[in-house]
Image (cartoon, rainbow, N blue to C red):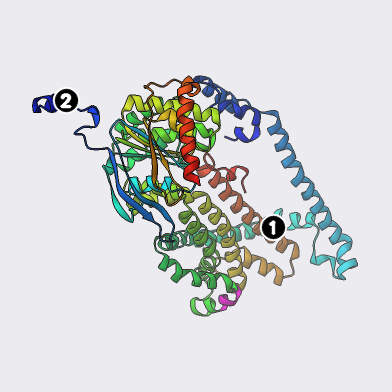
Amino acid sequence: MSYTDEHPASSIAITDAEVLSHDAHAAAVHVDLDAPPTRKSKREWSTLVGPVVVFVLFIGFWEYMHRDGMRRFLDKKPSLLPSPVTVVDQAFLDKIVRQQLLTGLGWTTYAAAIGLAITIVLGMGLAVLMARAVWLERSIYPYLVALQATPVLAIVPIIYSIFGGGMESRIYVCVMISIFPIVTNTLFGLTSVDASQHDLFTLRDAGSFTRLFKLQFPAAMPAIFTGFRISAGLAVIGAIVGEQFFRQGQKPGIGIVMEQFRQKLRYPAMYGGLLIAAALGITVFFLFSWIAKLVVGHWHESTRRGS
Amino acid sequence: MNFARQDGTTAPTMVPQMGTAPALRFNGVSMVYPDGTHALSETSFDVAPGEFVTVVGPSGCGKSTLLKVASGLNPPTTGSVTVDSRAVGYVFQDATLLQWRNVQRNVELLAELEGVGRAERARRAADAISLVGLKGFEKKYPKQLSGGMKMRASLARSLVLDPKVFLFDEPFGAVDEITRERLNDEVISLFARQGFAGLFITHSISEAVFLSTRVLVMSARPGRIVADYPIPFEYPRLPDLRFSPEFARIAGEISHTLRGAHA
Protein backbone atom coordinates (compact mmCIF):
# COMPACT_ATOMS: atom_id res chain seq x y z
CA MET A 1 0.00 0.00 0.00
CA SER A 2 2.70 2.42 0.92
CA TYR A 3 5.51 1.06 -1.15
CA THR A 4 5.79 4.13 -3.38
CA ASP A 5 6.71 6.32 -0.44
CA GLU A 6 9.02 3.97 1.33
CA HIS A 7 11.03 2.74 -1.62
CA PRO A 8 11.83 5.53 -4.00
CA ALA A 9 14.21 3.21 -5.85
CA SER A 10 11.70 0.49 -6.56
CA SER A 11 8.87 2.85 -7.50
CA ILE A 12 10.91 3.69 -10.58
CA ALA A 13 10.19 0.15 -11.66
CA ILE A 14 6.59 1.04 -12.46
CA THR A 15 7.11 4.13 -14.56
CA ASP A 16 6.31 3.81 -18.22
CA ALA A 17 9.95 4.17 -19.16
CA GLU A 18 10.34 0.49 -18.46
CA VAL A 19 9.51 -0.90 -21.84
CA LEU A 20 6.61 -3.08 -22.92
CA SER A 21 6.75 -6.06 -20.59
CA HIS A 22 3.78 -5.33 -18.38
CA ASP A 23 4.02 -8.70 -16.70
CA ALA A 24 7.41 -7.65 -15.48
CA HIS A 25 5.79 -4.51 -14.03
CA ALA A 26 3.21 -6.58 -12.25
CA ALA A 27 5.86 -8.84 -10.85
CA ALA A 28 7.89 -5.88 -9.59
CA VAL A 29 4.89 -4.41 -7.82
CA HIS A 30 4.00 -7.77 -6.37
CA VAL A 31 7.44 -8.29 -4.90
CA ASP A 32 7.28 -4.85 -3.34
CA LEU A 33 4.06 -5.64 -1.56
CA ASP A 34 5.25 -8.97 -0.25
CA ALA A 35 8.69 -8.16 1.02
CA PRO A 36 8.48 -6.46 4.42
CA PRO A 37 11.30 -3.93 4.51
CA THR A 38 13.53 -3.78 7.53
CA ARG A 39 13.12 -0.02 7.79
CA LYS A 40 9.45 -0.39 8.58
CA SER A 41 10.03 -2.49 11.70
CA LYS A 42 12.58 0.05 12.81
CA ARG A 43 10.00 2.78 12.53
CA GLU A 44 7.44 0.81 14.50
CA TRP A 45 10.01 0.34 17.24
CA SER A 46 10.64 4.09 17.45
CA THR A 47 6.94 4.95 17.42
CA LEU A 48 6.57 2.71 20.48
CA VAL A 49 9.54 3.95 22.43
CA GLY A 50 8.63 7.67 22.29
CA PRO A 51 5.20 7.35 23.87
CA VAL A 52 6.48 4.91 26.50
CA VAL A 53 9.19 7.36 27.57
CA VAL A 54 6.66 10.19 27.82
CA PHE A 55 4.33 7.92 29.81
CA VAL A 56 7.05 7.06 32.32
CA LEU A 57 7.97 10.76 32.66
CA PHE A 58 4.32 11.65 33.19
CA ILE A 59 3.79 9.04 35.91
CA GLY A 60 7.05 10.13 37.53
CA PHE A 61 5.95 13.78 37.52
CA TRP A 62 2.57 12.81 38.98
CA GLU A 63 4.20 10.81 41.77
CA TYR A 64 6.60 13.66 42.49
CA MET A 65 3.78 16.21 42.67
CA HIS A 66 1.96 13.95 45.14
CA ARG A 67 4.99 13.44 47.38
CA ASP A 68 6.50 16.90 47.31
CA GLY A 69 5.23 19.26 44.60
CA MET A 70 1.74 19.89 45.95
CA ARG A 71 3.12 21.32 49.17
CA ARG A 72 6.25 22.93 47.81
CA PHE A 73 4.73 24.73 44.79
CA LEU A 74 1.00 24.97 45.46
CA ASP A 75 0.85 24.85 49.25
CA LYS A 76 -1.94 22.28 49.10
CA LYS A 77 -2.59 18.98 50.80
CA PRO A 78 -1.02 16.01 48.95
CA SER A 79 -4.30 14.10 49.35
CA LEU A 80 -5.82 16.38 46.69
CA LEU A 81 -3.54 14.62 44.21
CA PRO A 82 -3.30 10.99 45.27
CA SER A 83 -0.39 8.92 44.04
CA PRO A 84 -1.02 6.93 40.83
CA VAL A 85 -0.55 3.77 42.84
CA THR A 86 -3.30 4.78 45.24
CA VAL A 87 -5.57 5.63 42.32
CA VAL A 88 -5.11 2.22 40.75
CA ASP A 89 -5.55 0.56 44.10
CA GLN A 90 -8.64 2.41 45.29
CA ALA A 91 -10.37 3.00 41.96
CA PHE A 92 -9.61 0.01 39.80
CA LEU A 93 -8.75 -2.75 42.27
CA ASP A 94 -11.66 -1.93 44.56
CA LYS A 95 -14.54 -4.02 43.33
CA ILE A 96 -17.37 -1.65 44.31
CA VAL A 97 -15.70 1.52 42.99
CA ARG A 98 -14.71 -0.25 39.81
CA GLN A 99 -18.31 -1.36 39.32
CA GLN A 100 -19.57 2.20 39.80
CA LEU A 101 -17.01 3.56 37.35
CA LEU A 102 -17.77 0.92 34.70
CA THR A 103 -21.51 1.56 35.00
CA GLY A 104 -20.74 5.26 34.59
CA LEU A 105 -18.61 4.50 31.56
CA GLY A 106 -21.52 2.54 30.09
CA TRP A 107 -24.02 5.40 30.49
CA THR A 108 -21.60 8.03 29.20
CA THR A 109 -20.81 5.90 26.16
CA TYR A 110 -24.53 5.42 25.62
CA ALA A 111 -25.26 9.16 25.69
CA ALA A 112 -22.26 9.99 23.50
CA ALA A 113 -23.06 7.24 20.97
CA ILE A 114 -26.69 8.24 20.55
CA GLY A 115 -25.72 11.91 20.43
CA LEU A 116 -23.09 11.18 17.79
CA ALA A 117 -25.49 9.07 15.73
CA ILE A 118 -28.02 11.92 15.69
CA THR A 119 -25.23 14.38 14.89
CA ILE A 120 -24.02 12.29 11.96
CA VAL A 121 -27.45 11.91 10.40
CA LEU A 122 -28.45 15.52 11.01
CA GLY A 123 -25.05 16.99 10.15
CA MET A 124 -24.59 15.07 6.93
CA GLY A 125 -28.17 15.81 5.92
CA LEU A 126 -27.56 19.53 6.44
CA ALA A 127 -24.29 19.33 4.51
CA VAL A 128 -25.98 17.65 1.54
CA LEU A 129 -28.66 20.35 1.51
CA MET A 130 -26.05 23.08 1.74
CA ALA A 131 -23.96 21.50 -1.02
CA ARG A 132 -26.98 21.45 -3.33
CA ALA A 133 -27.79 25.14 -3.26
CA VAL A 134 -25.70 28.16 -2.42
CA TRP A 135 -28.70 30.02 -0.99
CA LEU A 136 -29.26 27.18 1.48
CA GLU A 137 -25.62 27.25 2.47
CA ARG A 138 -25.80 31.01 2.98
CA SER A 139 -29.01 30.68 4.98
CA ILE A 140 -27.88 27.92 7.32
CA TYR A 141 -24.19 28.53 7.78
CA PRO A 142 -24.34 31.66 9.99
CA TYR A 143 -26.50 29.83 12.51
CA LEU A 144 -24.10 26.92 12.67
CA VAL A 145 -21.30 29.36 13.34
CA ALA A 146 -23.42 30.99 16.04
CA LEU A 147 -24.11 27.60 17.60
CA GLN A 148 -20.43 26.76 17.50
CA ALA A 149 -19.41 30.13 18.93
CA THR A 150 -21.86 30.04 21.84
CA PRO A 151 -20.26 28.40 24.89
CA VAL A 152 -22.14 25.20 25.52
CA LEU A 153 -22.08 25.82 29.27
CA ALA A 154 -24.17 28.92 28.67
CA ILE A 155 -26.88 26.87 26.98
CA VAL A 156 -26.87 23.94 29.38
CA PRO A 157 -28.90 25.73 32.10
CA ILE A 158 -31.60 26.53 29.54
CA ILE A 159 -31.74 22.93 28.41
CA TYR A 160 -31.93 21.92 32.05
CA SER A 161 -34.86 24.18 32.79
CA ILE A 162 -36.79 23.05 29.71
CA PHE A 163 -35.96 19.39 29.32
CA GLY A 164 -34.86 18.51 32.85
CA GLY A 165 -31.74 16.62 33.79
CA GLY A 166 -32.43 13.24 32.19
CA MET A 167 -30.75 11.35 29.41
CA GLU A 168 -32.34 13.37 26.58
CA SER A 169 -30.84 16.58 27.86
CA ARG A 170 -27.38 15.03 27.86
CA ILE A 171 -27.94 13.87 24.28
CA TYR A 172 -29.02 17.38 23.23
CA VAL A 173 -25.78 18.74 24.66
CA CYS A 174 -23.81 16.11 22.72
CA VAL A 175 -25.50 17.04 19.46
CA MET A 176 -25.05 20.77 19.97
CA ILE A 177 -21.39 20.52 20.78
CA SER A 178 -20.47 18.05 18.06
CA ILE A 179 -22.49 18.97 14.98
CA PHE A 180 -20.33 21.74 13.55
CA PRO A 181 -17.29 19.67 12.48
CA ILE A 182 -19.47 17.08 10.74
CA VAL A 183 -21.32 19.71 8.72
CA THR A 184 -18.24 21.69 7.73
CA ASN A 185 -16.09 18.69 6.87
CA THR A 186 -18.83 16.96 4.89
CA LEU A 187 -19.68 20.18 3.08
CA PHE A 188 -16.01 20.79 2.31
CA GLY A 189 -15.65 17.26 0.97
CA LEU A 190 -18.78 17.39 -1.17
CA THR A 191 -17.93 20.75 -2.72
CA SER A 192 -14.22 20.33 -3.36
CA VAL A 193 -14.49 17.67 -6.04
CA ASP A 194 -12.16 18.27 -8.98
CA ALA A 195 -13.84 20.34 -11.73
CA SER A 196 -12.72 18.00 -14.50
CA GLN A 197 -14.18 15.03 -12.63
CA HIS A 198 -17.45 16.94 -12.61
CA ASP A 199 -17.01 17.54 -16.36
CA LEU A 200 -16.64 13.80 -16.82
CA PHE A 201 -20.07 13.29 -15.27
CA THR A 202 -21.56 16.26 -17.14
CA LEU A 203 -20.44 14.80 -20.46
CA ARG A 204 -22.47 11.68 -19.74
CA ASP A 205 -25.52 13.70 -18.61
CA ALA A 206 -25.32 12.33 -15.09
CA GLY A 207 -28.17 13.44 -12.79
CA SER A 208 -27.51 15.12 -9.46
CA PHE A 209 -28.35 11.93 -7.56
CA THR A 210 -25.79 9.90 -9.52
CA ARG A 211 -23.30 12.71 -9.11
CA LEU A 212 -23.86 12.79 -5.36
CA PHE A 213 -23.45 9.07 -4.78
CA LYS A 214 -20.91 8.11 -7.40
CA LEU A 215 -18.73 11.22 -7.27
CA GLN A 216 -19.23 13.62 -4.38
CA PHE A 217 -19.73 11.23 -1.48
CA PRO A 218 -16.87 8.90 -2.35
CA ALA A 219 -14.57 11.89 -2.92
CA ALA A 220 -15.68 13.41 0.39
CA MET A 221 -15.09 10.28 2.48
CA PRO A 222 -11.66 11.29 3.86
CA ALA A 223 -13.00 14.70 4.92
CA ILE A 224 -16.16 13.12 6.33
CA PHE A 225 -14.13 10.76 8.46
CA THR A 226 -12.05 13.64 9.75
CA GLY A 227 -15.34 15.23 10.80
CA PHE A 228 -16.50 12.00 12.46
CA ARG A 229 -13.32 11.76 14.46
CA ILE A 230 -13.46 15.32 15.75
CA SER A 231 -17.18 15.10 16.47
CA ALA A 232 -16.88 11.77 18.27
CA GLY A 233 -14.42 13.29 20.71
CA LEU A 234 -16.69 16.29 21.21
CA ALA A 235 -19.70 14.02 21.78
CA VAL A 236 -17.87 12.37 24.68
CA ILE A 237 -17.06 15.79 26.10
CA GLY A 238 -20.70 16.83 25.62
CA ALA A 239 -21.96 13.78 27.48
CA ILE A 240 -19.67 14.42 30.45
CA VAL A 241 -20.38 18.16 30.54
CA GLY A 242 -24.10 17.37 30.56
CA GLU A 243 -23.71 14.87 33.34
CA GLN A 244 -21.67 17.18 35.52
CA PHE A 245 -24.16 19.96 35.14
CA PHE A 246 -27.35 17.93 35.54
CA ARG A 247 -25.89 15.66 38.23
CA GLN A 248 -29.01 13.59 38.54
CA GLY A 249 -28.69 10.08 39.83
CA GLN A 250 -30.78 8.34 37.19
CA LYS A 251 -28.50 6.54 34.73
CA PRO A 252 -25.33 7.90 36.37
CA GLY A 253 -22.63 8.51 33.77
CA ILE A 254 -18.96 8.92 34.51
CA GLY A 255 -19.36 12.66 35.10
CA ILE A 256 -22.00 12.05 37.77
CA VAL A 257 -20.00 9.28 39.41
CA MET A 258 -16.96 11.58 39.56
CA GLU A 259 -19.03 14.35 41.08
CA GLN A 260 -20.35 12.00 43.76
CA PHE A 261 -16.82 10.91 44.67
CA ARG A 262 -15.71 14.52 44.82
CA GLN A 263 -18.47 15.41 47.25
CA LYS A 264 -17.41 12.51 49.47
CA LEU A 265 -13.77 13.64 49.18
CA ARG A 266 -12.83 10.28 47.70
CA TYR A 267 -10.13 11.72 45.46
CA PRO A 268 -8.46 8.48 44.33
CA ALA A 269 -11.82 7.19 43.04
CA MET A 270 -12.47 10.54 41.36
CA TYR A 271 -9.13 10.43 39.58
CA GLY A 272 -10.02 6.90 38.50
CA GLY A 273 -13.11 8.38 36.85
CA LEU A 274 -10.97 10.98 35.15
CA LEU A 275 -8.68 8.31 33.75
CA ILE A 276 -11.65 6.33 32.49
CA ALA A 277 -13.14 9.41 30.83
CA ALA A 278 -9.79 10.08 29.15
CA ALA A 279 -9.57 6.45 28.03
CA LEU A 280 -13.04 6.73 26.48
CA GLY A 281 -12.05 9.83 24.51
CA ILE A 282 -8.82 8.21 23.32
CA THR A 283 -10.60 4.99 22.34
CA VAL A 284 -13.17 6.91 20.33
CA PHE A 285 -10.43 8.82 18.53
CA PHE A 286 -8.53 5.68 17.55
CA LEU A 287 -11.72 3.81 16.71
CA PHE A 288 -12.62 6.41 14.11
CA SER A 289 -9.05 6.62 12.81
CA TRP A 290 -9.16 2.87 12.37
CA ILE A 291 -12.53 2.89 10.61
CA ALA A 292 -11.29 5.68 8.32
CA LYS A 293 -8.22 3.66 7.44
CA LEU A 294 -10.40 0.64 6.74
CA VAL A 295 -12.78 2.55 4.48
CA VAL A 296 -10.52 4.97 2.58
CA GLY A 297 -6.99 3.86 3.45
CA HIS A 298 -6.56 1.79 0.30
CA TRP A 299 -6.91 4.81 -1.98
CA HIS A 300 -6.36 7.91 0.16
CA GLU A 301 -2.86 8.97 1.13
CA SER A 302 -3.07 10.81 4.39
CA THR A 303 -5.04 8.34 6.52
CA ARG A 304 -2.16 5.92 6.45
CA ARG A 305 -0.61 7.01 9.70
CA GLY A 306 -3.87 7.26 11.55
CA SER A 307 -4.11 10.97 12.12
CA MET B 1 -17.56 6.70 -56.40
CA ASN B 2 -19.80 4.45 -58.46
CA PHE B 3 -22.59 6.88 -58.01
CA ALA B 4 -20.41 9.67 -59.36
CA ARG B 5 -19.61 7.71 -62.51
CA GLN B 6 -23.24 6.97 -63.29
CA ASP B 7 -23.89 10.61 -62.90
CA GLY B 8 -21.36 11.30 -65.59
CA THR B 9 -19.42 13.68 -63.39
CA THR B 10 -15.71 13.31 -62.80
CA ALA B 11 -14.64 11.10 -59.93
CA PRO B 12 -13.83 13.28 -56.95
CA THR B 13 -10.29 13.21 -55.70
CA MET B 14 -11.15 13.27 -52.00
CA VAL B 15 -13.33 10.18 -52.08
CA PRO B 16 -13.73 9.43 -48.35
CA GLN B 17 -14.94 12.91 -47.47
CA MET B 18 -17.37 13.18 -50.34
CA GLY B 19 -20.97 12.73 -49.34
CA THR B 20 -20.17 11.81 -45.73
CA ALA B 21 -21.09 14.28 -43.06
CA PRO B 22 -18.11 15.55 -41.06
CA ALA B 23 -17.68 13.89 -37.68
CA LEU B 24 -17.22 17.32 -36.16
CA ARG B 25 -17.92 20.73 -37.68
CA PHE B 26 -17.10 24.15 -36.24
CA ASN B 27 -19.13 26.83 -37.94
CA GLY B 28 -18.10 30.41 -37.13
CA VAL B 29 -17.63 29.63 -33.46
CA SER B 30 -16.77 32.50 -31.11
CA MET B 31 -16.42 32.24 -27.40
CA VAL B 32 -16.44 35.07 -24.90
CA TYR B 33 -16.41 34.00 -21.26
CA PRO B 34 -18.59 35.83 -18.74
CA ASP B 35 -15.49 37.52 -17.33
CA GLY B 36 -14.87 39.11 -20.73
CA THR B 37 -12.08 36.81 -21.89
CA HIS B 38 -12.34 36.55 -25.66
CA ALA B 39 -11.14 32.98 -26.15
CA LEU B 40 -12.20 32.07 -29.68
CA SER B 41 -12.93 34.20 -32.68
CA GLU B 42 -14.92 33.07 -35.75
CA THR B 43 -13.43 29.62 -35.89
CA SER B 44 -14.56 27.28 -38.66
CA PHE B 45 -13.21 23.86 -39.64
CA ASP B 46 -14.32 20.27 -40.18
CA VAL B 47 -12.96 17.01 -38.94
CA ALA B 48 -13.95 14.21 -41.31
CA PRO B 49 -14.45 10.62 -40.13
CA GLY B 50 -11.08 8.93 -40.07
CA GLU B 51 -9.21 12.22 -39.80
CA PHE B 52 -6.89 13.06 -36.93
CA VAL B 53 -6.66 16.81 -36.57
CA THR B 54 -4.29 18.45 -34.13
CA VAL B 55 -4.47 22.07 -33.07
CA VAL B 56 -1.27 23.76 -31.94
CA GLY B 57 -1.07 27.28 -30.66
CA PRO B 58 0.60 29.53 -28.11
CA SER B 59 -0.45 28.86 -24.53
CA GLY B 60 -3.63 30.58 -23.48
CA CYS B 61 -4.85 30.92 -27.06
CA GLY B 62 -8.15 29.15 -26.47
CA LYS B 63 -7.16 25.64 -27.57
CA SER B 64 -8.84 24.03 -24.60
CA THR B 65 -11.90 26.18 -25.11
CA LEU B 66 -12.18 24.57 -28.52
CA LEU B 67 -12.67 21.18 -26.88
CA LYS B 68 -15.02 22.47 -24.20
CA VAL B 69 -17.19 23.83 -26.98
CA ALA B 70 -16.85 20.70 -29.13
CA SER B 71 -17.91 18.45 -26.27
CA GLY B 72 -20.87 20.61 -25.32
CA LEU B 73 -19.47 21.42 -21.87
CA ASN B 74 -19.55 25.13 -22.78
CA PRO B 75 -22.01 26.41 -25.39
CA PRO B 76 -20.37 28.83 -27.86
CA THR B 77 -21.25 32.52 -27.68
CA THR B 78 -21.94 32.60 -31.42
CA GLY B 79 -21.73 30.06 -34.19
CA SER B 80 -22.43 26.37 -33.91
CA VAL B 81 -20.76 23.02 -33.47
CA THR B 82 -22.19 19.95 -35.18
CA VAL B 83 -21.29 16.65 -33.57
CA ASP B 84 -23.05 13.57 -32.27
CA SER B 85 -22.42 14.29 -28.61
CA ARG B 86 -23.30 10.76 -27.49
CA ALA B 87 -20.36 9.48 -29.51
CA VAL B 88 -17.73 11.85 -28.12
CA GLY B 89 -14.83 10.58 -26.05
CA TYR B 90 -12.96 13.18 -23.98
CA VAL B 91 -9.43 12.72 -22.68
CA PHE B 92 -8.64 15.38 -20.09
CA GLN B 93 -5.41 17.24 -19.42
CA ASP B 94 -4.86 15.19 -16.29
CA ALA B 95 -6.07 11.63 -16.05
CA THR B 96 -9.08 12.57 -13.84
CA LEU B 97 -9.35 9.03 -12.53
CA LEU B 98 -11.57 8.57 -9.50
CA GLN B 99 -9.03 7.86 -6.76
CA TRP B 100 -11.35 5.53 -4.85
CA ARG B 101 -11.87 3.20 -7.80
CA ASN B 102 -9.31 0.73 -9.05
CA VAL B 103 -8.33 0.67 -12.73
CA GLN B 104 -11.06 -1.79 -13.67
CA ARG B 105 -13.82 0.23 -12.01
CA ASN B 106 -12.46 3.50 -13.40
CA VAL B 107 -12.50 2.13 -16.91
CA GLU B 108 -16.05 0.91 -16.39
CA LEU B 109 -17.26 4.29 -15.14
CA LEU B 110 -18.60 5.85 -18.33
CA ALA B 111 -20.37 2.65 -19.36
CA GLU B 112 -21.85 2.53 -15.86
CA LEU B 113 -23.14 6.09 -16.23
CA GLU B 114 -24.66 5.11 -19.58
CA GLY B 115 -26.51 2.26 -17.88
CA VAL B 116 -24.61 -0.58 -19.52
CA GLY B 117 -25.13 -3.86 -17.65
CA ARG B 118 -22.52 -5.23 -15.28
CA ALA B 119 -21.33 -8.18 -17.39
CA GLU B 120 -21.21 -6.16 -20.60
CA ARG B 121 -19.22 -3.31 -19.11
CA ALA B 122 -16.77 -5.71 -17.46
CA ARG B 123 -16.20 -7.29 -20.86
CA ARG B 124 -15.71 -3.92 -22.60
CA ALA B 125 -13.42 -2.71 -19.82
CA ALA B 126 -11.29 -5.84 -20.13
CA ASP B 127 -10.96 -5.22 -23.88
CA ALA B 128 -10.05 -1.56 -23.40
CA ILE B 129 -7.56 -2.35 -20.64
CA SER B 130 -5.71 -4.83 -22.81
CA LEU B 131 -5.81 -2.39 -25.77
CA VAL B 132 -3.90 0.23 -23.78
CA GLY B 133 -1.54 -2.36 -22.30
CA LEU B 134 -2.69 -2.22 -18.68
CA LYS B 135 -3.44 -5.92 -18.34
CA GLY B 136 -2.41 -7.09 -14.88
CA PHE B 137 -3.10 -3.68 -13.31
CA GLU B 138 -6.89 -3.97 -13.05
CA LYS B 139 -6.90 -4.02 -9.26
CA LYS B 140 -4.43 -1.16 -8.76
CA TYR B 141 -5.58 2.19 -7.44
CA PRO B 142 -4.57 5.46 -9.14
CA LYS B 143 -2.10 6.37 -6.39
CA GLN B 144 -0.22 3.17 -7.24
CA LEU B 145 0.21 4.11 -10.91
CA SER B 146 2.78 6.25 -12.70
CA GLY B 147 1.66 9.29 -14.67
CA GLY B 148 1.85 7.44 -17.95
CA MET B 149 -0.17 4.53 -16.66
CA LYS B 150 -2.85 6.88 -15.37
CA MET B 151 -3.12 8.36 -18.86
CA ARG B 152 -3.49 4.86 -20.32
CA ALA B 153 -6.28 4.12 -17.87
CA SER B 154 -7.90 7.40 -18.86
CA LEU B 155 -7.67 6.43 -22.55
CA ALA B 156 -9.17 3.02 -21.79
CA ARG B 157 -12.04 4.67 -19.95
CA SER B 158 -12.98 6.66 -23.05
CA LEU B 159 -12.52 3.64 -25.35
CA VAL B 160 -15.19 1.70 -23.48
CA LEU B 161 -17.96 3.71 -25.14
CA ASP B 162 -16.35 3.18 -28.57
CA PRO B 163 -16.54 6.89 -29.44
CA LYS B 164 -16.67 8.04 -33.04
CA VAL B 165 -15.00 11.32 -32.13
CA PHE B 166 -12.11 11.52 -29.70
CA LEU B 167 -11.21 14.85 -28.11
CA PHE B 168 -7.78 15.08 -26.48
CA ASP B 169 -7.02 18.10 -24.29
CA GLU B 170 -3.21 18.20 -24.06
CA PRO B 171 -3.33 14.76 -22.48
CA PHE B 172 0.40 14.09 -22.34
CA GLY B 173 1.63 17.50 -21.25
CA ALA B 174 2.51 16.33 -17.75
CA VAL B 175 4.45 13.16 -18.58
CA ASP B 176 8.12 12.88 -19.44
CA GLU B 177 9.40 12.85 -23.02
CA ILE B 178 9.97 9.09 -23.31
CA THR B 179 6.58 8.25 -21.88
CA ARG B 180 4.97 10.82 -24.12
CA GLU B 181 6.47 9.26 -27.24
CA ARG B 182 5.31 5.82 -26.22
CA LEU B 183 1.82 7.08 -25.49
CA ASN B 184 1.83 8.76 -28.92
CA ASP B 185 2.68 5.41 -30.51
CA GLU B 186 -0.27 3.89 -28.69
CA VAL B 187 -2.67 6.65 -29.71
CA ILE B 188 -1.57 6.12 -33.33
CA SER B 189 -2.19 2.40 -33.17
CA LEU B 190 -5.56 2.94 -31.46
CA PHE B 191 -6.46 5.45 -34.15
CA ALA B 192 -5.46 3.01 -36.89
CA ARG B 193 -7.41 0.19 -35.29
CA GLN B 194 -10.56 1.94 -34.06
CA GLY B 195 -10.93 4.41 -36.90
CA PHE B 196 -12.30 7.31 -34.83
CA ALA B 197 -12.03 10.95 -35.79
CA GLY B 198 -9.59 12.74 -33.53
CA LEU B 199 -9.25 16.34 -32.41
CA PHE B 200 -6.06 16.70 -30.43
CA ILE B 201 -4.77 19.76 -28.58
CA THR B 202 -1.09 20.13 -27.82
CA HIS B 203 1.71 22.65 -27.67
CA SER B 204 4.26 20.11 -28.93
CA ILE B 205 4.81 20.46 -32.67
CA SER B 206 6.53 17.10 -33.05
CA GLU B 207 3.66 15.40 -31.26
CA ALA B 208 1.23 17.17 -33.59
CA VAL B 209 3.04 16.19 -36.78
CA PHE B 210 3.62 12.62 -35.63
CA LEU B 211 0.00 11.93 -34.76
CA SER B 212 -2.07 13.81 -37.27
CA THR B 213 -3.47 13.75 -40.75
CA ARG B 214 -3.81 17.53 -40.43
CA VAL B 215 -2.30 20.18 -38.19
CA LEU B 216 -4.10 23.47 -37.56
CA VAL B 217 -2.22 26.43 -36.18
CA MET B 218 -4.04 28.83 -33.91
CA SER B 219 -3.24 32.47 -33.27
CA ALA B 220 -2.81 34.07 -29.87
CA ARG B 221 -6.00 35.05 -28.06
CA PRO B 222 -8.65 35.47 -29.32
CA GLY B 223 -7.79 32.23 -31.06
CA ARG B 224 -8.56 31.55 -34.68
CA ILE B 225 -7.15 29.12 -37.22
CA VAL B 226 -4.31 30.77 -39.18
CA ALA B 227 -2.85 27.79 -41.04
CA ASP B 228 -3.83 24.27 -42.07
CA TYR B 229 -1.10 21.71 -42.86
CA PRO B 230 -1.94 18.30 -44.31
CA ILE B 231 0.54 15.70 -43.01
CA PRO B 232 1.36 13.25 -45.81
CA PHE B 233 2.81 10.28 -43.87
CA GLU B 234 1.17 6.87 -44.13
CA TYR B 235 -0.13 4.96 -41.11
CA PRO B 236 1.07 2.97 -39.28
CA ARG B 237 3.73 5.52 -38.38
CA LEU B 238 6.86 4.15 -36.80
CA PRO B 239 8.74 5.93 -34.01
CA ASP B 240 11.71 6.64 -36.30
CA LEU B 241 9.52 8.84 -38.48
CA ARG B 242 10.34 11.62 -36.05
CA PHE B 243 13.90 11.70 -37.36
CA SER B 244 13.14 11.80 -41.09
CA PRO B 245 14.06 14.97 -43.06
CA GLU B 246 10.49 15.38 -44.34
CA PHE B 247 9.19 15.30 -40.75
CA ALA B 248 11.73 17.95 -39.75
CA ARG B 249 10.79 20.11 -42.72
CA ILE B 250 7.07 20.10 -41.90
CA ALA B 251 7.70 20.62 -38.20
CA GLY B 252 9.99 23.55 -39.05
CA GLU B 253 7.35 25.15 -41.23
CA ILE B 254 4.69 24.83 -38.54
CA SER B 255 7.09 26.20 -35.97
CA HIS B 256 7.72 29.19 -38.22
CA THR B 257 4.00 29.86 -38.62
CA LEU B 258 3.48 29.46 -34.91
CA ARG B 259 6.10 32.08 -34.14
CA GLY B 260 4.28 34.39 -36.51
CA ALA B 261 1.01 33.64 -34.78
CA HIS B 262 2.53 34.41 -31.43
CA ALA B 263 3.66 37.88 -32.41
For mark 1, name the chain. Answer: A
Task: Determine whether B100 is above or below A126 in the image.
Answer: above
Q: Which mark is residue B159?
A: none
The residue located at (33%, 43%) in the rendering is B113
* Residue shown at 68% from the left, 61% from the top: A273
Q: Estimate the spatial distance between the alpha carbons at disc 1 and disc 2, rounded to whole Å.
A: 91 Å
Check disc 1 and give the amino acid type: Leu
Q: Give the residues in magenta.
A: A153-157
Percent position of residue B119, x then y: 30, 31
**A201 or B62: which is nearer to us?**
B62
Residue to which mark 1 is pinned: A275
Quadrant containing the N terminus of chain B is top left
Name which residue type carries label 2.
Answer: Met
Q: Is residue A94 left or right of residue A185?
A: right
Q: Nearer the viewer, residue B217 or B35?
A: B217
Q: Are marks 1 and 2 in contact (CB under 8 Å)?
A: no
